[in-house]
Image (cartoon, coloured by chain):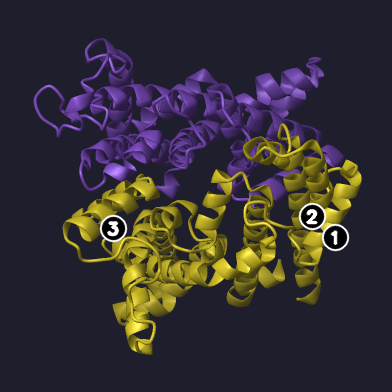
Chain colours: A purple, B yellow
């Protein structure tokens, strides 16, 4: 399993756009988690009288209305946005694999019940599901946000996994495992799911882009990551009244979102192409 | 045909029932109830809160609440807004519908018109420099948060260049007796920035669907046969190949039909466009559950309807579906 997944990733990296995406992701992650040691401390007492300073020496991205360094805030917002997206997708993919695996393996009423539920859930646009789930929290802990983003992201994955498991259920290696006395849990986890690892990886990669955009949107509406925790969407919300006087305060966090999502989507596309060359 | 149609419609109805149950359960799963916050904000007596509870039916047992919720939803009654009490949710939604229809319709038309044209162009010029750059450009737009792109466009065209209005749907200073033409022109000017923003971020999907579908058809034998018969290339492309490469795009259109009515929460919010999207966004800010729930139900119904219509279109367009 790990061998084939590894080969899939290597094949995705043979395409220029896949390589570009992977390089950008690697650099961004590295930068976001290393740069805080190199940059001015965002929580250091700023010079409140100076206000928003345009980009220049000392503050490459300028400062916001409280004279906080925008680059530092983009970096710490990136830590939050990237971690939230990564964890939420991990949760979503795990749920999707389990539900899809169970439905495909057992079939029957369990399959029907689960898939009818997934049909229903897929008919509600994810943003509206999130609005319903998120609006209640007066103060939303980050963990709850991750949970909610993950819990609304697994429906499509479960469909894919179910289809593949259904196809593989009668395969000879599964029959052989059953004959050797493997239980259903072992067969699903050790024999079926590893063979679906490719499509799951593709869904997960593309899912990260979706979640980053959704989290930014929720934070922009003021109900995602909440102040004082910095996030890219929240920075754009804060910067809205400064649009005429200090446009850089909204431009840079937006560029950070767009670059990250673009890189993730490029890599996801390359992975999909590597998995199914016809689709490229 | 009728049997297929009945089965397909029934399936959509069952899914909608599941949607209703899911939404109800979600709303109830949430900690506390909507009135708690209201009561906290406005210093109400316990009796007043209890009276309100009774008015909104929150004091009933959960099963009663559920049946009255479903019965109401089936009758088109989505309850009463908390923020705009005592306006009905259905009245609010209806009042916001025209603006969303206008924005959504324009965006669908633009996205599919431009997307199909560019997708066909890319397929014909596959692997050329233009093809690659169009893909890159559209993917870059696709990666942008719509609210941010809206803000940037509003800043540049509205504030820097003073070319276009950046909020609302009408100019409040416009003479109310102005001619029909002037008023239409005013709405159109307000429409440009939100419509361009939404089109820009959604174009990539249509382009990609059209490009991939056309490439797949172009390599089929019947296209080769048509060319061999000496049919002009333009005719081969549009009459023979493109017709057959339209199905995935039709499916996507069905998927996006909800946009017609729900528009975009973010873009409508950025431009203060008086549609359903900004209604939902404002409702979230005010914790106005009945309104959030009502818009969610409406959008889900549209998603199901869009899927149904797309399947019907497949059925009409593709004889192979009929045999299956």
Q: Vertically, is A22 above or below B111? A: above
Chain label for disc 1: B
Residue B120, located in which quarter of the rendered image? bottom left
Q: Is residue A54 visible in this depiction of the protein?
A: yes
Q: Are marks 2 and 1 on the same chain?
A: yes
Chain label for disc 2: B
Indicate left or right for A62 with A135 as reference: left
Q: Secondary structure at mark 1?
A: helix
Chain label for disc 3: B
> Label 2: which residue?
B17
Disc number placed over residue A215 in the picture, else none: none
Indicate left or right for B71 with A131 as reference: right
> Looking at the image, which is closer to me, A165 or B200?
B200
> Looking at the image, which is closer to me, A4 or A101?
A101
Q: Secondary structure at mark 3?
A: loop
Answer with mark 2 or mark 1, whichever residue precedes in sequence: 2
Disc number placed over residue B71 in the picture, else none: 1
Residue A188, located in which quarter of the rendered image? top right
Direction top: furthest residue: A37
Q: Vertically, is A120 above or below A139? A: below
Answer with mark 3 or mark 2, whichever residue precedes in sequence: 2
CA–CA distance in space, label 3 to label 2 = 45 Å
> Given contact means CB atoms under 8 Å apart, are the residues at marks 2 and 1 in contact?
no
Neighbour tally class for label 1: few under 14, some 14-19, many 20 plus, Cα within 10 Å = few
> Label 3: which residue?
B126
Residue A115 place in picture, x, y as percent: 74, 44
Residue B74 place in picture, x, y as percent: 80, 64
Neighbour tally class for label 2: few under 14, some 14-19, many 20 plus, Cα within 10 Å = some
Residue B232 place in picture, x, y as percent: 30, 82
Foreground tag (3 vs 2): 2
Foreground tag (3 vs 1): 1
């Amino acid at each position: 399993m790990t061998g084939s997944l590894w080969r899939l990733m290597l094949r995705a990296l043979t395409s220029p756009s896949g390589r570009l995406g992977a390089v950008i992701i690697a650099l961004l992650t590295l930068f976001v988690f290393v740069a805080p040691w190199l940059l001015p401390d965002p929580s250091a007492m700023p010079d409140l009288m100076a206000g928003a300073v345009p980009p220049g020496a000392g503050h490459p991205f300028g400062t916001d209305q409280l004279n906080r360094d925008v680059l530092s805030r983009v970096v710490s917002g990136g830590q939050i946005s990237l971690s939230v997206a990564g964890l939420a997708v991990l949760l979503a993919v795990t749920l999707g694999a389990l539900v899809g695996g169970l439905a495909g393996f057992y079939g029957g009423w369990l399959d029907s019940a689960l898939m009818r539920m997934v049909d229903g859930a897929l008919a509600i646009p994810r943003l509206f599901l999130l609005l319903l789930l998120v609006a209640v929290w007066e103060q939303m802990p980050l963990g709850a946000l991750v949970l909610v983003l993950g819990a609304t992201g697994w429906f499509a994955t479960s469909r894919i996994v179910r289809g593949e498991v259904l196809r593989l259920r009668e395969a000879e290696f599964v029959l052989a495992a059953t004959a050797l006395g493997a239980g259903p849990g072992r067969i699903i986890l050790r024999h079926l799911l590893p063979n679906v690892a490719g499509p799951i990886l593709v869904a997960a990669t593309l899912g990260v882009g979706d979640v980053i955009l959704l989290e930014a949107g929720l934070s922009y509406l003021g109900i995602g990551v909440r102040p004082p925790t910095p996030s890219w969407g929240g920075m754009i919300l804060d910067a809205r009244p400064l649009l005429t006087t200090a446009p850089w305060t909204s431009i840079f966090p937006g560029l950070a979102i767009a670059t990250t999502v673009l890189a993730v989507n490029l890599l996801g596309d390359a992975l999909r192409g590597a998995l199914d060359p016809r689709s490229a | 045909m009728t049997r297929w149609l009945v089965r397909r419609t029934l399936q959509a109805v069952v899914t909608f029932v599941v949607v209703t149950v899911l939404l109800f359960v979600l709303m109830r799963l949430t900690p506390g109830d909507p009135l708690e916050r209201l009561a906290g904000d406005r210093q109400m007596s316990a009796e007043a809160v209890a009276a309100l509870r009774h008015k909104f039916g929150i004091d009933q047992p959960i099963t009663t609440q559920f049946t009255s919720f479903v019965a109401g939803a089936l009758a088109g009654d989505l309850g009463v807004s908390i923020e705009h009490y005592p306006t009905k949710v259905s009245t609010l939604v209806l009042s916001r519908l025209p603006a969303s229809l206008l924005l959504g319709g324009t965006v669908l038309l633009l996205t599919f018109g431009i997307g199909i044209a560019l997708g066909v162009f890319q397929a014909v010029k596959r692997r050329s420099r233009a093809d690659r750059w169009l893909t890159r450009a559209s993917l870059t737009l696709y990666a942008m948060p719509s609210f941010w792109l809206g803000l940037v466009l509003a800043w540049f065209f509205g504030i820097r260049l003073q070319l276009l209005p950046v909020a609302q749907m009408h100019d409040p200073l416009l003479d109310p007796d102005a001619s029909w033409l002037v008023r239409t022109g005013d709405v159109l000017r307000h429409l440009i920035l939100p419509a361009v923003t939404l089109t820009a971020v959604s174009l990539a999907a249509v382009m990609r669907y059209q490009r991939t579908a056309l490439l797949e058809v172009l390599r089929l034998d019947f296209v080769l046969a048509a060319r061999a018969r000496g049919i002009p290339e333009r005719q081969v492309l549009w009459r023979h190949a493109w017709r057959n490469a339209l199905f995935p795009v039709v499916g996507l259109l069905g998927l996006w039909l909800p946009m017609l009515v729900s528009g975009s929460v973010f873009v409508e919010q950025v431009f203060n466009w008086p549609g359903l999207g900004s209604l939902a966004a404002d409702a979230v800010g005010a914790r106005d559950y009945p309104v959030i729930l009502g818009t969610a139900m409406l959008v889900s119904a549209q998603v199901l309807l869009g899927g149904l219509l797309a399947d019907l279109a497949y059925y009409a367009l593709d004889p192979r579906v009929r045999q299956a």
